[in-house]
Structures are given as structure tokens and as C-alpha cells.
Amino acid sequence: MVRADKTRNQEAVLAAAGRLFDAAHDPDDVSMDAVAAEAGVGKGTIFRGFGDRAGLIRALYEQRAAAFVVQTRRESPAHQGSPADAVYFLLSRLWRFKRQNRTLALSLDRAGHASPYRNESYENAHGQLTALLSHHGEQADFLAHSLLAAVRSDLVEHLHDRPDEEIAAGVRTLVDRVVPAERAR
Amino acid sequence: MVRADKTRNQEAVLAAAGRLFDAAHDPDDVSMDAVAAEAGVGKGTIFRGFGDRAGLIRALYEQRAAAFVVQTRRESPAHQGSPADAVYFLLSRLWRFKRQNRTLALSLDRAGHASPYRNESYENAHGQLTALLSHHGEQADFLAHSLLAAVRSDLVEHLHDRPDEEIAAGVRTLVDRVVPAERAR
DNA sequence: ACTGTAGCGGACTGTCAGTCCGCTTTTTGG
DNA sequence: CCAAAAAGCGGACTGACAGTCCGCTACAGT
């Protein structure tokens, strides 16, 4: 049996961390002490529940990513047409997510060693992309990494003042070139 | 007049930092105290000369990047054939550089805010790529960022156990698709 | 209710980036 | 060549933060 207070606390911590990351401008403006205080728990509780800072960030990121997938799936066309459309859809969704979760996404990038890749949602996206690309020539694995790199959170951050349409057009062009046209096999 | 000891010290610091980053496995295994000790100067000297940690890292990175350009320019074909070849050449050179300067490159990524982009050598590479791409359709700027993202140091790190040829083939494929073939205009 | 234990809190530790100021070295100009 | 001024130096000091530790609390099973 899992103790009731444990789950309650973990949720409080995630919620508190979410609030603080949303409010913060720079990722490391959010300290663990601050999260503990905001959540109304002791610091030890956080570390017991999430291991370390990176663990907390990852957990929160996963939670949000999962919610985002659910949400966008509802709003979106049930099925996309061409593979290029599907890839574009995936990438622009990721872009949007990272824009909406700016500070959190940046934190993940900087947390620990190679952490942006050790991450369920990255694995997911990479897997989907690889599948979509593997029908169209070699190096699907590497190309999938490249496409995901194009929506890296700090690139999103770097280009944050560009109008949405410009980014969308860029992503579209990239995808159209990388994913060969339907019958170009 | 610039004091002689100042330049001497700055050089000592850069050399020391270089040695330590080369030896370290993880970027933040290199502390400023360690650099000061290795260089045989006081800590204040480093901060006076480079501003902060990010400044030191950037300075060292620039120094190495400049040296690398000089070195590879000597070893390379005087001029590359197609634009795709030129782009491929640039990207694989960057990949090689980041592999050779693993820890340093990773440090730069994590140093301060958006620092991988606030960087002379990034600007250079981005400029060159944009020029090469702009003959072939729109969004050259964004595409240049994307291509550079494909050789981000932590992706290099993430794929460090893949054989060179696999990476090279991946980069080649990416470039061939993103840079339209000569007469495909 | 009673007891064993999982979980809690927050004081404590170690580490590190960055500051500060009295002291030393270099430059300048007489 | 020498003294005064300026520039730079070093390393003790500060503040902040991640992560640990252990005596205490409150939950769950009986």
C-alpha cells in the first residue's frame, strides 16, 4: 500500500514546480527550496520523491507532454495525409509545446547529462519520426534526430521573436525537403 | 598600454582551462578555482579577464574554433564543387570539431542563456550556410539553423558511440535533401 | 487502540561562482 | 633613474544552492 500523503505530496510538488517554472524567466531562478516552500513540504520530500533536480524536471515535463498530446490529439485531424504532413504536424506541435513551456523546456535541456534525450517523450517522437522516414530511404534514425534538433527548446528560445508564420514556413520547408515527395521513391 | 602581465595571465588561464576541459568528462567537473590553480593565478584574475564562467568558456571555444578553421582549411580541397558539397563539408567539419572538443563544446551549450548562439563561430557558420542556401528557395535562415542544430554538441555526444561512417552518411543524406540538387531549381 | 514502519521536515554540509580590498607590479613622466 | 600613479593581482570571504541526514510524525495493518 502506498501511503496517501506520499501521493498527495508528490502532486503538490509537481503543481508547485509547474507554477514556479511558468512564472520564472530563467530556468535556474527556480530553486528546490522555492519549490518546497511553494508546495508546503520539506525539501527532503522532493528529493525522496524525485531523486534530484533533473528528476523533478523530467517528471514535470513528462506530465505536461502527456497532457499536451492528449489535448492536441483531440483538436487535430484524426489522421494526416502524406507522411510529410504527419511529420510536419508532429514537429509543429513540439514547437508549440516548447513555446508554451519555455522555461521548463529550457530547464530540461540543461538538467544533467544528455538529459533532453533520456526522456520518454523524446523517445516517442524519435520513434514515430523514424518510422515515418524509414519508408523513404536510409538514415531514418539520424534524420529523425536532426528534425527533432530543429525544434530544440533553445532554438525555439533563440527565435522567439520571429512571427509564428515564419517559423511554420521554415519547418514546412525543412520537412518537405527531408521527407521525399510521395512518389519520389 | 596594456600591461604585460595581464596578457601573459590571460594566456595562462586559457591554456590551463583548455587542459582541464580536455581532461574532464563532465563540463562542470571544471571549477573556476581549479582553473585558477592550474594556471597559477588568483581567481580574481580570471573574472577580471573574462567576466564570468561563460565568458571564459566562450573565449576558449572561439580560440579553438579559429585554430580549427585554419587547420582544416589547409588540409582541405581549396574549393568545393556543388553547394551541397560545401554545406556537407562545413557540417562535417563542425561535427569533427565538437567531437574533438567534447567537454568544452558541451560546456558552451550549458553556459548561461542561449549562449550557443551568441558566439562568433556560430554566427559565421550560420552566415555561410544562409548564403549557400539562399540560392535555393526560401527560409534559408531557418534552414541554416536547422542544419546547425543537427550538429549540436549534445547530439554529437548522444551519438558518440555510432561509427563515424554512419554519422557521415546521415549528415550527407540530410544535406542532399535539404540542399536541392544543382539543376532542380 | 497499538505498534512497526514509511515518510516527513528542515537544519546542516560541501561546493562553487562571483566579489572585494589591501598589496604588488608595471608604467609613466619628470 | 626614481617616485608617484595607475593598473592589476590574489585569495579570503559571501551568498546561494543541491543534496543529505536523522529524530520525529502520522499512516496502515491488525
Image (cartoon, coloured by chain):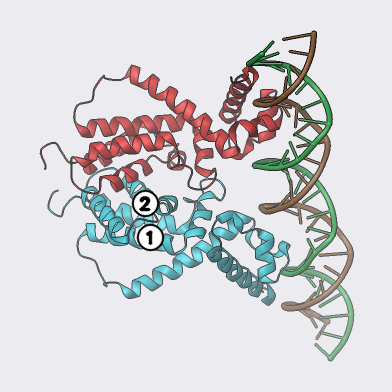
Chain colours: A red, B cyan, C brown, D green
Point out residue A96 in the picture as x, y percentages from the top left corner: 40, 30
Residue A148 visible in image:
yes
Please report the residue visible at 59 percent of the width from the left and 25 percent of the height from the top: A19
Please report the residue visible at 28 percent of the width from the left and 56 percent of the height from the top: B166
Point out residue D16 in the picture as x, y percentages from the top left corner: 72, 41
Secondary structure of the residue carrying tag 1 is helix
Q: Earlier in the sequence, mark 2 or mark 1?
A: 1
Point out residue B168 in the picture as x, y percentages from the top left corner: 28, 58
Spatial CA span between label 2 and label 1: 9 Å
The quadrant of the rendering that contains the N terminus of chain B is bottom right
Q: Nearer the viewer, residue A70 or B177?
A: A70
Q: Amino acid at mark 1?
A: Leu
**With D3 as the anchor, is B2 left or right in this view?**
left
In the drawing, what numbered circle is on residue B148? 2
Q: Nearer the viewer, residue A139 or B85?
A: A139
Q: Chain of mark 2?
A: B
Q: Amino acid at mark 2?
A: Leu
The residue at which mark 1 appears reads as B94
User: Which of the 4 image quadrants contains residue B99?
Assistant: bottom left
**With A63 as the anchor, is A47 left or right in this view?**
right
Please report the residue visible at 50 percent of the width from the left and 33 percent of the height from the top: A102
